């Protein structure tokens, strides 16, 4: 019988006890393997180059290279890996730059262990997770009057429904179940709405939805 491939995870956090706790929890999760631990951004970049992990759990505030710069550098050398921010901070000056640097998901350290594990599994499926407080802040920051003939005005009613669910972090299967349509139809709508919004992926589409007040 073929063995399921493990999701490789790199931990980057300057607090040793946080790393120990995360490693202990994740090592009990089926299908997840912690392949390395880094105590700072520079070491995190070096280990990312060495291990090419599927997922990097990235702290934001660290001595030396912070999580924002480390995220940017990790994605340069390992563009296929997903960076999940795991932090105690919701400051605008930290949150928005790391998302712009390419962070795939954003969680707070108040998250439960199973939520972190679920976010890791979701990341390798291409589904980003935004902490509810993060999503709310994004809505407050980006909600602006729509310009004349905004790109989303060209979306069909069904494409708009798909976009709203996508912005809530729903997978294709979950969208199909909620709208009672086939998953191939969902993929067709996602492809169309990405083209119409002129964005590259689901994360950018979600950000567009929050920025334009479409995710309520």
Image (spheres, grey):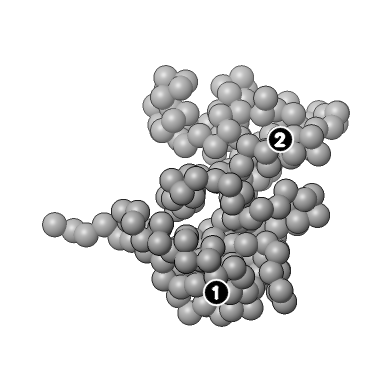
Q: Taking 200 as reference, is 54 above or below it?
A: below
In percent of the image, x 69 and y 69: which residue is there?
62
What percent of the width, then of the height, locates residue 188? 49, 34
Assess whether mark 1 and mark 2 are in contact (beta carbons under 8 angstroms). no
Task: Determine if residue 177 is in view.
Answer: yes
- Judging depth in this view, the residue of 78 and 27 nearest the camera is 27
What percent of the width, then of the height, locates residue 164? 61, 28
User: In the image as oriented, which residue stretches furthest toward the front?
Assistant: 17
194 relative to 182 in the view: left or right: right
Q: Which residue position is annotated with label 2?
A: 136
Q: Which residue position is annotated with label 1?
A: 38
Task: Determine if residue 81 is in view.
Answer: no
In percent of the image, x 46 and y 73: which residue is there?
36
- Judging depth in this view, the residue of 179 and 143 nearest the camera is 143
- Judging depth in this view, the residue of 58 and 149 nearest the camera is 58
Q: Earlier in the sequence, mark 2 or mark 1?
A: 1
19 relative to 139 in the view: left or right: left
């Amino acid at each position: 019988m073929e063995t399921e491939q493990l999701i490789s995870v790199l931990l980057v956090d300057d607090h040793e006890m946080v790393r120990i706790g995360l490693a202990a929890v994740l090592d009990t999760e089926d299908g997840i393997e912690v392949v390395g631990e880094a105590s700072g951004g520079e070491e995190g970049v070096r280990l990312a180059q060495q291990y090419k992990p599927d997922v990097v759990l990235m702290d934001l505030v660290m001595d030396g290279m912070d999580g924002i710069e480390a995220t940017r550098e990790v994605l340069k050398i390992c563009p296929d890996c997903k960076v999940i921010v795991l932090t105690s901070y919701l400051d605008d000056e930290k949150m928005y730059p790391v998302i712009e640097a390419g962070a795939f998901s954003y969680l707070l350290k108040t998250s439960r262990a199973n939520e972190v594990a679920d976010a890791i599994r979701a990341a390798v499926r291409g589904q980003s997770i935004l902490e509810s407080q993060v999503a709310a802040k994004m809505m407050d920051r980006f909600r602006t009057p729509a310009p004349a003939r905004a790109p989303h005005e060209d979306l069909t009613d069904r494409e708009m429904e798909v976009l709203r669910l996508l912005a809530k972090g729903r997978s294709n299967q979950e969208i199909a179940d909620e709208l009672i349509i086939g998953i191939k139809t969902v993929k067709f709508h996602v492809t169309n709405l990405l083209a119409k919004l002129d964005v590259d992926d689901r994360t950018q589409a979600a950000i567009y939805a929050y920025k334009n007040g479409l995710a309520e």
